[in-house]
Image: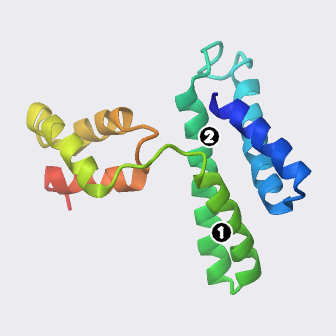
Amino acid sequence: MGLKEQLVEDMKTAMKSKETGRLDAIRLLRAAIQRLEVDRTDRKNPNYGQEITETDYIGVIQKEIKQRRDSIEAFEKGNRSDLADKERAELVIMEHYLPRQLTREEIVAALTPLVEREGKDFRKIMPLASKELKGKAEGRLINEVVKELTGQA
């Protein structure tokens, strides 16, 4: 079962069991996915007409998770712990739909051969690393590891 179908099934389950927090988070993810699908039908979009893959769906979820993390940080700075708690709850639910994320050590192991093969140029390595690990690790963590491996840290 694909990610999109899993969201539909989980939404039905959340509706039946009246889990409003879970239902709200799933609806947010489904809306973001629908925006992606609509964007792919817009001729002005650079990705117009491309087939939507599971990796695209994972990218949407990662983007939503990043927004939640940024919101939590902003709400905590503004002393709005009530809103930060709501975002944290959504974050936990959304993270459930991501594949297992690589640890820092696994990222280092995956990128070390790339750096050895391509050289220690950060600007050259970073796009390759991001492409190779897309959906498997958080971009911020990939960036930190690439900086370490290329001597930019």
Residue annotated with mark 1: 88
Q: Is residue 130 above or below residue 147?
A: above
Q: Is residue 36 above or below residue 77?
A: above
Indicate which label's residue lies in the foreground, 2 or 1.
1
Question: At which x and y percent is residue 38?
Answer: 76, 25
Residue kind at label 1, given as amino acid type: Arg
Locate residue 126: give its quadrant. top left
| Secondary structure of the residue carrying numbered label 1 | helix
Q: Is residue 99 above or below residue 68?
A: above
Residue at x 36% of width, y 56% of height: 141
Residue at x 33% of width, y 50% of height: 142
Q: Earlier in the sequence, mark 2 or mark 1?
A: 2
Locate residue 36: give its quadrant. top right
Q: Nearer the viewer, residue 126 or 20?
A: 20
* Labels 2 & 1 near each other (Cβ < 8 A): no
What is the total number of numbered labels drawn onto the structure image? 2
Residue at x 58% of width, y 64% of height: 69
Cα separation, mark 2 vs mark 1, equals 18 Å
Q: Nearer the viewer, residue 122 or 106?
A: 106
Horizontal side, residue 100 vs residue 57: left or right: left
Q: Is residue 49 above or below residue 120?
A: above
**Mark 2 neighbour density, 10 Å: few (under 14) some (14–19) many (20 or more):** some
Question: At which x and y percent is residue 3?
Answer: 64, 34
Horizontal side, residue 40 vs residue 56: left or right: right
Question: At which x and y percent is residue 145?
Answer: 26, 54
| Secondary structure of the residue carrying numbered label 2 | helix
Residue kind at label 2, given as amino acid type: Val
User: Residue 47, which numbered label?
Assistant: none
Image quarter of the C terminus: bottom left
Residue annotated with mark 2: 60
Residue 146 in view in this figure: no
